[in-house]
C-alpha cells in the first residue's frame, strides 16, 4: 500500500521528537528538595551538598576551583503507582515524572535558567487522537506550545518556573501537589539530579521533514521511492546486469583481490540502477562488502573523469552508527596496492598533492570538532554559515598551499610522463587522454574475447596446438589456391588442344582424348575430382566452371581461416597490451580469469589515473578561484554551494558523515536556509539494518541510487514490500541483492 508522503513525514518527525521527550527517572540519582525552594529559585540542604559532591568527584583542585555552576535536571513532581496485587500494577509500577525542568546551580544553591524549554515526558503522553486515558496527549502539548510562547532568552528563574506551572495547569489540570492522577501517589516533594537535557541530534533531520511538509517541496526521487515503493522485480538473474557491468566496471581502489562472483553480480546490479533506485545488500563480516563499495565508488569516479570538462559525482556514505562511520573512513584510507604489485613502485598510485593520503572526507559534527578529531583524519567542517570551511579545505584552499602544491604535482607528473608539461592544462589533458585510451582498451577487450570465443565454439576446445593447426591450414589453403590457378589454367589449355584438335573437338574420340589429357594432368597434381571417370565427357566450359567453383570454395575457406586467426591474434594482442603477464589461452578458457586480472592489474590503474586527473583539475580550479576571490569559499547560494561540494569531490571521491550531521551541512541560502534537495548523486548507508527509518528517510533526499546493507537485515520488516534473491558467495554465507524498480539504464544528472 502506498503511503501519503506528507503524513509519513509528519509521523517520522513526531517519532524523532519522541526521542527528545523521554527521560527515565530510574536512570538518575534523584535527590529530594523542596518545591517551595525551587519556586524561589533555590536548591538547598542535602540535595545541594550531594550535587556538588558528585560534580567534583574526579576533578583536580584547579578544576574544582574553576567550576562555578553545574547543570541539573529538576522534577517538580514524581508520581508513584499505587501498590496493589492486580495484573495491571506490574505494567504501571514505574515512577512517572510529568514534566522536567533544566537549569544550572551555583555553590550557594541559586538556580540559573538555561535556554532549554521544559520537557513533558513522552512516557506520560499517548499518540495523537488516542482514546486510551493518560495524563495528557501529544495533541494537547502541540496545541499548548502553538499558543504559548516560552520565556525569552535571558529571563529570570521566576519566569521559567511560572511558564512551567502554567503548562502543568494546561496539560494536567493542576500544578504539582494540587493534581494527582488516578492510581498514582504524589511523592509530596520535588527532586533534582545532576544532568543535562537529552542531546538533540535530530534537529537537522526534523528540519528536512518540516521543509517538505510546510513548503510542499517536490520529493527527491529516492525519498519518493522509499515512501511508496513500486512493485519489486528480480534482478540477480537479469542478463542486462552483466552487460552493463562489463561496460562500466572501470575502477578498483585496491589490487589485492579480485571481486568474487557475488560482488561482481551486485556491482552490475548497481551500475544498471536509475536515479532513485535502491540496491540493498546484506551479509556477515568477511563477505566482501567493503571491496564492493570501493568498486562502486571507483567505477563512477573514473566514469565521470571520461566526460570532457565534466564534474565528479557527489557521493555520501552515512550511518547512524559511529562504528560504521569509522569503518567507512578506514575503507577509504586503505586505497593502496599490495607490496609486489606491478604498479606499487609507480608514483601514479600515490597522491600528487602534499599532506593528503585518504580518499574519504569526513564531515564531523560541531561537538566532535570541539572535542577533537582523530589525528591524520581528512575532515571538513563549517561551524557557522558563511564562514570559510575549516579542516582539509581550510588548509588546502589557500594561496600558500597552491604555491607549494602545483610545483610538487607537476614534478610528479613529469616523473610519470617522462617530460615536463607546458602548463597544468596540458598535464590534465594528457592524463585524461591516457585514461580514455586505457578505458577504450578495456572496453574493447570483451568484444575481442567474444570473437575469440567464437573461434573456440567453431573449433572445439581452443589450445595453442589448435591455433597452430589453423595456421597450417591457412598455408595449405594458400598453396591449394596457387595450384588451382597455375595447374587449372594448364588443364584448360590441354583441354582446348591444338588448333586442329579444337576444330575437331566435336568428334567423340577427339573430345575424349582432350579431356583424358586434361584430367590426367589434374590427377597428377592432385586436383582431379574423384567423381569423374573415363567415360565422363566434359567440355572446356564445364571445366572452367568447375575450376571457378573450386577457387571460390578455397577463397571462402581462406577467409574463414583468416577471420578466426585475426580474432585470436586480436585477442592475444589486446591481452598482451593490458595484461602482459596473463597467458591468453588461460584468459580465454575462463572469463573469470580475465576479470580477475583486470580487477587486480588494470582497474586500479584507471582509478589512480582518474585520481591524478581530478587533483590537477582541483589545482586549476582553486588557483583560478583564489585569483578572483571566488564566492565558492564563503558564498551560500545554491550554485556556489554545489560547486564547492564538487570541488571537494575532486579531492576525495566519497563524503562521510552521520545521518544527523549531513542534512545540516548540505544546505544553501536564498533569503533563508534551504536544503540541497536532489543534489547527492549516490547515497551509501552502512549498517542500514540498524538505521531507524525515521532517521534514514531525511538523508534520502537525493538523486541517490544505492543503499548498502552491511549487516544481515530483513527489508520486508521495515515497511516496504520487496522480494529478495539470494546468490552464493565464494567465501562464506550469502549476500542478498534487492531492488525496488525494474532495471533501467543509468541516468546522468540533469545539469
Image (tube, rainbow, N blue to C red):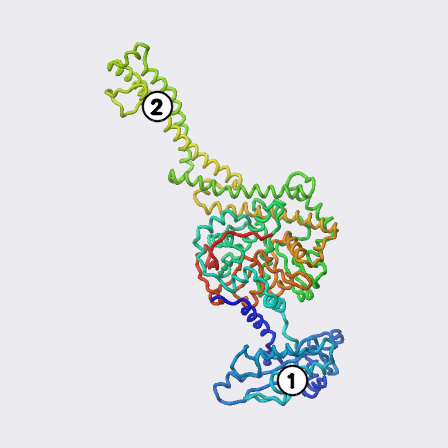
Outermost residue, front direction?
Answer: 216
Q: Position of residue 400 (x, y in %)?
A: 75, 51
Q: CA distance from mark 2 to mark 1?
A: 115 Å
Outermost residue, top direction?
Answer: 500
Q: Position of residue 447 (x, y in %)?
A: 47, 41
Q: Position of residue 179 (x, y in %)?
A: 61, 88
To which residue does mark 1 refer? 76
Density class for disc 1 (Cα within 10 Å; few <14, some 14-19, many ≥20) is many
- Please tell me whether mark 1 sits on a helix, a strand or a loop: loop
User: Along the horizontal axis of the image, is 551 left or right of 346?
Assistant: left
Q: Nearer the viewer, mark 2 or mark 1?
A: 2
Viewer-nearest residue: 352 or 492 = 492
Density class for disc 2 (Cα within 10 Å; few <14, some 14-19, many ≥20) is some
- Residue at image coords 25%, 13%: 507
Q: Position of residue 638 (x, y in %)?
A: 66, 58
User: Along the horizontal axis of the image, is 269 left or right of 170?
Assistant: left
Which of marks 1 and 2 precedes in the sequence? 1
Q: Is residue 66 visible?
A: yes
Q: Residue 437's image quarter?
A: top right
Viewer-nearest residue: 346 or 276 = 276
Viewer-nearest residue: 398 or 463 = 398
Per the rendering, the mark at residue 481 is none
Q: Is residue 56 visible?
A: no
User: Along the horizontal axis of the image, is 98 left or right of 447?
Assistant: right
- Residue at image coords 61%, 61%: 657
Q: Is residue 250 above or below residue 151?
A: above
Residue contact at pointers 2 and 1, CB within 8 angstroms? no
To which residue does mark 2 refer? 547
- Residue at image coords 68%, 64%: 672
- Please tell me whether mark 2 sits on a helix, a strand or a loop: helix
Amino acid at each position: 500500500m502506498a503511503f501519503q508522503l506528507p503524513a509519513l513525514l509528519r509521523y517520522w518527525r513526531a517519532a524523532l521528537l519522541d526521542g527528545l521527550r523521554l527521560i527515565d527517572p530510574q536512570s538518575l540519582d534523584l535527590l529530594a528538595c523542596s518545591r517551595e525552594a525551587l519556586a524561589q529559585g533555590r536548591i538547598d540542604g542535602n540535595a545541594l551538598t550531594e550535587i556538588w559532591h558528585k560534580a567534583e568527584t574526579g576533578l583536580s583542585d584547579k578544576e574544582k576551583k574553576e567550576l562555578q555552576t553545574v547543570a541539573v535536571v529538576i522534577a517538580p513532581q514524581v508520581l508513584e503507582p499505587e501498590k496493589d496485587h492486580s495484573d495491571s500494577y506490574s505494567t504501571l509500577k514505574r515512577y512517572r515524572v510529568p514534566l522536567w525542568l533544566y537549569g544550572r546551580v551555583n555553590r550557594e544553591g541559586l538556580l540559573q535558567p538555561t535556554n532549554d524549554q521544559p520537557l513533558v515526558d513522552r512516557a506520560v503522553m499517548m499518540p495523537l487522537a488516542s482514546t486510551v486515558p493518560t495524563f495528557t496527549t501529544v495533541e494537547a502539548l502541540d496545541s499548548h506550545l502553538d499558543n504559548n510562547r516560552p520565556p525569552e532568552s535571558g529571563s529570570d528563574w521566576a519566569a521559567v518556573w511560572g511558564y512551567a506551572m502554567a503548562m502543568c495547569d494546561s496539560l494536567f489540570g493542576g500544578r504539582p501537589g494540587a493534581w494527582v492522577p488516578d492510581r498514582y501517589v504524589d511523592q509530596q516533594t520535588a527532586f533534582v539530579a545532576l544532568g543535562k537535557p537529552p542531546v538533540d541530534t535530530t534537529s537537522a533531520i526534523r528540519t528536512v521533514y518540516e521543509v517538505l511538509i510546510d513548503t510542499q517541496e517536490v520529493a527527491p526521487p529516492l525519498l519518493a521511492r522509499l515512501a511508496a515503493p513500486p512493485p519489486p522485480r528480480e534482478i540477480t538473474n537479469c542478463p542486462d546486469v552483466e552487460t552493463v557491468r562489463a561496460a562500466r566496471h572501470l575502477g578498483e581502489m585496491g589490487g589485492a583481490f579480485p571481486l568474487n562472483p557475488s560482488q561482481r553480480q551486485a556491482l552490475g546490479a548497481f551500475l544498471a540502477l536509475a536515479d532513485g533506485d535502491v540496491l540493498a545488500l546484506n551479509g556477515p563480516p568477511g563477505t566482501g562488502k567493503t571491496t564492493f563499495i570501493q568498486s562502486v565508488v571507483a567505477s563512477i569516479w573514473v566514469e565521470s573523469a571520461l566526460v570532457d570538462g565534466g564534474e565528479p559525482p557527489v557521493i555520501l556514505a552515512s550511518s547512524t552508527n559511529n562504528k560504521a562511520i569509522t569503518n567507512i573512513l578506514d575503507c577509504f584510507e586503505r586505497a593502496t596496492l599490495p607490496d609486489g604489485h606491478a604498479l606499487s613502485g609507480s608514483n601514479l598510485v600515490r597522491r600528487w598533492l602534499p599532506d593528503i593520503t585518504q580518499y574519504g572526507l569526513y564531515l564531523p559534527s560541531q561537538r566532535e570538532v570541539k572535542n577533537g578529531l582523530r589525528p591524520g583524519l581528512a575532515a571538513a567542517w563549517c561551524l557557522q554559515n558563511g564562514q570559510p570551511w575549516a579542516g582539509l579545505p581550510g588548509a588546502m584552499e589557500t594561496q600558500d598551499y597552491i604555491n607549494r602544491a602545483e610545483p610538487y604535482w607537476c614534478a610528479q607528473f613529469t616523473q610519470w610522463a617522462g617530460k615536463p608539461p607546458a602548463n597544468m592544462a596540458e598535464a590534465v589533458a594528457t592524463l585524461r587522454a591516457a585514461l580514455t585510451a586505457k578505458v577504450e582498451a578495456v572496453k574493447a577487450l570483451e568484444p575481442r574475447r567474444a570473437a575469440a570465443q567464437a573461434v573456440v565454439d567453431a573449433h572445439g576446445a581452443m589450445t595453442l596446438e589448435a591455433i597452430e593447426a589453423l595456421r597450417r591450414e591457412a598455408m595449405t589453403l594458400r598453396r591449394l589456391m596457387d595450384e588451382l590457378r597455375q595447374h587449372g589454367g594448364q588443364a584448360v589449355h590441354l583441354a582446348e588442344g591444338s588448333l586442329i584438335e579444337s576444330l575437331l573437338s566435336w568428334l567423340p574420340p577427339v573430345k575424349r582424348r582432350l579431356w583424358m589429357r586434361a584430367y590426367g594432368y589434374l590427377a597428377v597434381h592432385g586436383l582431379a575430382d574423384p567423381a569423374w571417370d573415363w567415360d565422363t565427357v566434359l567440355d572446356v566450359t564445364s571445366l572452367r566452371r568447375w575450376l571457378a567453383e573450386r577457387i571460390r570454395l578455397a577463397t571462402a575457406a581462406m577467409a574463414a581461416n583468416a577471420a578466426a586467426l585475426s580474432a585470436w591474434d586480436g585477442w592475444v594482442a589486446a591481452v598482451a597490451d593490458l595484461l602482459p603477464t596473463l597467458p591468453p589461452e588461460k584468459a580465454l578458457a575462463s572469463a573469470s580469469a580475465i576479470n580477475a586480472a583486470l580487477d587486480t592489474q588494470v582497474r586500479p590503474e584507471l582509478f589512480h589515473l582518474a585520481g591524478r586527473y581530478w587533483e590537477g583539475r582541483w589545482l586549476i580550479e582553486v588557483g583560478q578561484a583564489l585569483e578572483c576571490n571566488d564566492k565558492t569559499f564563503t558564498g551560500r547560494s545554491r550554485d556556489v554551494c554545489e560547486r564547492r561540494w564538487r570541488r571537494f569531490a575532486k579531492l576525495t571521491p566519497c563524503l562521510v558523515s552521520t545521518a544527523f550531521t549531513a542534512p545540516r551541512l548540505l544546505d544553501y541560502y536564498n533569503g533563508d536556509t534551504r536544503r540541497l534537495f536532489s543534489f547527492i548523486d549516490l547515497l551509501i548507508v552502512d549498517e542500514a539494518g540498524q538505521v531507524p527509518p525515521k532517521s534514514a528517510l531525511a538523508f534520502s533526499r537525493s538523486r541517490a541510487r544505492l543503499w548498502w546493507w552491511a549487516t544481515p537485515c530483513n527489508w520486508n520488516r521495515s515497511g516496504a514490500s520487496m522480494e529478495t534473491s539470494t546468490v552464493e558467495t565464494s567465501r562464506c554465507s550469502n549476500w542478498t541483492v534487492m531492488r525496488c524498480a525494474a532495471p533501467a539504464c543509468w541516468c546522468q544528472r540533469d545539469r
